[in-house]
Image (tube, rainbow, N blue to C red):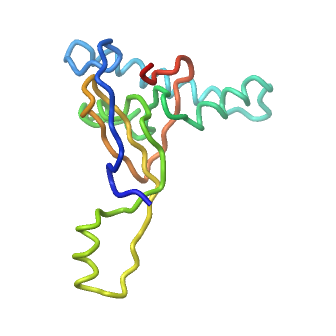
Amino acid sequence: MFEPYQNVTGTDRDDDLLSLEESARPHRDALLALADLLERTTLVGRPAPIVETIGHRIRNPRVGDLVAERSGLVSLRADRRIHSLGILVEHRHEWETTGEEWRAVQAEDPFADRTAVEVWYVQYGPAAGDVCRWENCRFIALPGLDYRPR
């Protein structure tokens, strides 16, 4: 089992898809709004087969997809929206705490259980270090191109 951030790295990007410049905020907000609308259009009763396929793809992001975290789609906080859009780097189960944090917990309570959680790592900016870790969240994909580095 992995520890938080273990073996997770972003990629330095030379395109402007994940620009953090102030001038890029309207574009990022537009992508978040489009992601929300696209997903909602697939939530119809008795969908046509193509709508069902698209909805399944949107709700099941893959590593390399451009993704949006649902709570960030409607957040009024700009920093929350910035971290809510990016490239999915990793989606996995891992320990909730680092080994060091866990040893401190065990020193206090030797019978405590170590908890694993489902986490998502998303590169939200152009630098390899612009990666954030999410838990207790729901991501949707903006299907299209694969944004993994070649």
- The answer to whether 144 is drawn above or below residue 4 in the figure is above
Figure quadrant of residue 17? top left
Figure quadrant of residue 132? top left
In-front residue for pair 59/105: 105
Q: Is residue 44 left or right of residue 89?
A: right
Q: Residue at x 45, y 24 (%)?
A: 148
Q: Residue at x 44, y 41 (%)?
A: 90
User: Which quadrant of the rendered structure holds the C terminus?
Assistant: top left
Residue 100 percent across, percent down from the top left: 23, 67
Figure quadrant of residue 25? top left
Residue 11 percent across, percent down from the top left: 33, 27
In-front residue for pair 75/68: 68
Residue 4 percent across, percent down from the top left: 33, 54
| Residue lying at the far left of the rendered structure | 22
- The answer to whether 138 is drawn above or below residue 12 in the figure is below
Q: Is residue 14 left or right of residue 119?
A: left
Q: Residue at x 22, y 12 (%)?
A: 23
Q: Residue at x 41, y 29 (%)?
A: 87
Residue 127 percent across, percent down from the top left: 24, 26
Q: Is residue 102 left or right of residue 115?
A: left
